[in-house]
Image (cartoon, rainbow, N blue to C red):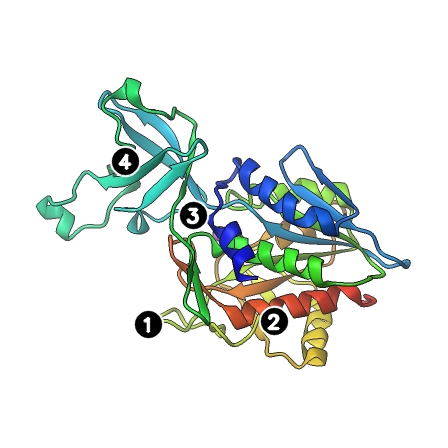
Amino acid sequence: MKERIRQLVEAYGPSGHEAQIRALIEEQVAPHADKVRTDAMGNLIALKRGSGDGKPVMIAAHMDEIGLVVTYIDEKGFLRFSPTGGVSPVTLVGSRVRFANGTTGVIGWEKWFRPEGNTSRPELSELYIDVGATGRDDTPVGVGDAAGFVRPFEDLGQRLIAKSMDNRISCAVAIQALSEMGETPNDLYFCFTAQEEVGTRGAITASYGIEPALGLAVDVTLVGDTPKARPMAVSLGEGPAIKIMDSGMLAHPGVVRWMIEAAESLEIRYQREVLQGGSTDARSIQLSRAGVPAGCLSIPCRYVHTPSEMVDYGDVQNAVKLLVTLLTGEINL
Ligand code: CO
Ligand code: ZN
């Protein structure tokens, strides 16, 4: 599974520019699905048909990642940019980025090595991308092109680091579960959603089209286990988290119960998650049409929205087990 994770986390795919990551995921899910399609928003939807009269279930793992879009190119060829998704300037100085066409650049800061640069925090407006151009006419990218971050996948054994664990680790969990599961009574719609990082937009149209009886997002969540972190009862390595609430959603109590019972029947460790800030595709599913019972299976993750996000491999493996059990059983909320 680690090789699958490496491929997914290293792929390019900022919000709205998901073609490359979508092609990679399509290749991996096609052998295990009855039907695969892409909708107008760019969501990839793989259907595994149920063998009985089970429920239509939507599983949503967003495949987009935070990124930067070029807004202006100056006469020397330096690129100014606007973020797509929650990008903090603190994480950017010296970072490397890559565009869809393979162009690579480094992020510079106007104040680097100036006295105020030693004490102040960078503003996005003070940062630029240097693609090594000798002038405006020499830049191999243009206004509107999007860049994603570049970092290699690091396997530390138990812990894994990558630039886009949010949310490729959940894509890996969903694909792995799909590939491992046998028959299921339920019609399973595995949605690899687009544009989550700019406001869970892909999941809105996907859930409207699918009309699921139940929606389950798979996404990362924050942890409280690092030095002086905001207190939070989720840690790396203590098991996948079952979302009770975040700032955009109160999970359906029946869905929470269904998830807890499955984890307890498997005798795996799990954590109850209350996330103060942030939300997931589950919010969009829950609010679609006349409302859908929804919840979220979360992978605890350190340093979310930095170029080095860390997860625990045991949590990842248990998330796969839990997802297989959830989706292959009869569902009565
Ligand atoms: Co995110
Ligand atoms: Zn996410």
247 vs 326: above or below:
above
317 horizontally vs 130: left or right: right
Give the mark, 3 or 1, whose residue is nearer the N terminus.
Answer: 3
Q: Quadrant of the N terminus?
A: bottom right
Give the mark, 1 or 2, whose residue is nearer the N terminus.
Answer: 1
Q: Secondary structure at mark 3?
A: loop
Q: Which amino acid is tagged 3?
A: Gly
> Which residue is disc 2 drawn over?
318
Residue 287 showing in the rendered view: no
The Cα atoms of the two marked residues, 4 and 1, are separated by: 31 Å
Along the line of sight, which residue is nearer the eye, 306 or 208?
A: 306
> Which residue is disc 4 drawn over?
128
Give the mark, 4 or 1, whose residue is nearer the N terminus.
Answer: 4
Q: Are marks 4 and 2 in contact (CB under 8 Å)?
A: no
Task: Place residue 314 in its image quadrant.
Answer: bottom right
Q: Secondary structure at mark 4?
A: strand
> Which residue is disc 3 drawn over?
86
Give the mark, 3 or 4, whose residue is nearer the N terminus.
Answer: 3
The tally of labels here is 4
> Which residue is disc 1 drawn over?
228
Q: Quadrant of the C terminus?
A: bottom right
Give residue 296's position: percent from left, percent from top.
Answer: 63, 61
Give the mark, 4 or 2, whose residue is nearer the N terminus.
Answer: 4
The Cα atoms of the two marked residues, 3 and 2, are separated by: 28 Å
Give residue 75's position: percent from left, percent from top.
Answer: 23, 20
Give residue 140's position: percent from left, percent from top.
Answer: 36, 25
Tell me if the residue at label 3 has its CB under 8 Å from ligand 1. Answer: yes
Q: Which amino acid is tagged 1?
A: Lys
Q: Residue furthest top?
A: 137
